[in-house]
Amino acid sequence: MSLRNFILGLAASFGLAWLCLVIIPFVKMRNLAPIQFNKDLDGAEGVFYPKRGGRIANGARVYGENGCYLCHTQLVRPTYAGQDMHRPDMGGLQNDPQRGDTRRETNAYDFEGERFAQIGSARIGPDLSNVARRFEAAAAVKGDDNLEAAFYAHLYDPRLKPEQAKAICPSHKYMFDEIEVKGQRPDEAMPFGETETTVLVPDADARALVSYLLSMKKDQPVPAALNFPFAGDKQPSAK
């Protein structure tokens, strides 16, 4: 084989792999076809529309710029790729007080509104697919519904609570500004890190990131066509 043919063959192999693994999935993610509910299977009709609130685009940018995807995934894996459904509340809530078992696997529509699907590169920290639901469940037990404050506290110091003293998540204190208080305490002041004359307030990136994290509630009802079997049984549908 000549060097020329070898180089052409190598380029063709690389190009085909790039086409199949990068270009085609990227195009499909940008042009997701509407999925219809099936009345017999889903008990509902109409087009499935993934609803997410919050500053998705800005928050996703901050999430990526700070390397959150290096330690956290956003992927409840299908059974053929691993078994995530046994992990507590990762794929939704097993005992949602309103809807029962809402667990399911991740699908492409879960990344609606984002430029990239940030599925992550390693799971050093917990998966974040449903982190907002987990925070809500924990807050309900404590009788505290201030979820934003809980997320801000974790960003500022992941080891702020004694039970999280061994957390390895880095602090994001640089996302908070220390301002001097002259008169009334500002509404956006944090309930931590204050002194006699100063308080901490989140900057624009912190607000965008927390808004993005609060949108992570990927356990809404989806059409049966988007569900996959796992553990030898049918994927539980969100009700």
Image (spheres, rainbow, N blue to C red):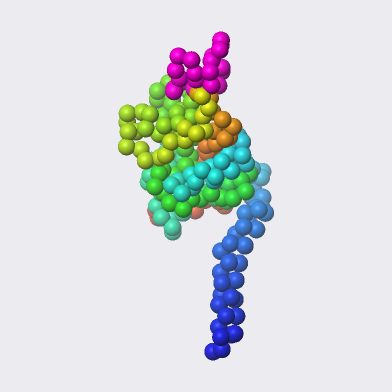
Question: Whole-percent x and y of residue 45?
Answer: 64, 43
- Is residue 87 something that shows in the picture? yes
Question: Whole-percent x and y of residue 206?
Answer: 54, 33
**Residue beneath the point at 56% across and 64% down:** 21
Q: Quadrant of residue 179?
A: top right
Magenta range is: 179-199
**Residue beneath the point at 48% across and 39% down:** 130
If the image is split into quadrants, where does the N terminus sit? bottom right
**Residue beneath the point at 63% across and 44% down:** 113
Instruction: Using the image, determine if residue 225 lies above or below residue 90.
Output: below
Magenta: main secondary structure equals loop
- Is residue 147 something that shows in the picture? no
**Residue beneath the point at 38% across and 29% down:** 160
Q: Quadrant of residue 57?
A: top right
Instruction: Using the image, determine if residue 2 lies above or below residue 97.
Output: below
Q: Quadrant of residue 25?
A: bottom right
- Residue 225 drawn in magenta: no
Q: Nearer the viewer, residue 13 or 143?
A: 13
Q: Nearer the viewer, residue 159 or 74?
A: 159
Instruction: Using the image, determine if residue 117 lies above or below residue 20.
Output: above
Q: Is residue 185 left or right of residue 95?
A: right
Q: Nearer the viewer, residue 149 or 174?
A: 174
Question: Whole-percent x and y of residue 37?
Answer: 62, 46
Question: Whole-percent x and y of residue 238?
Answer: 51, 41
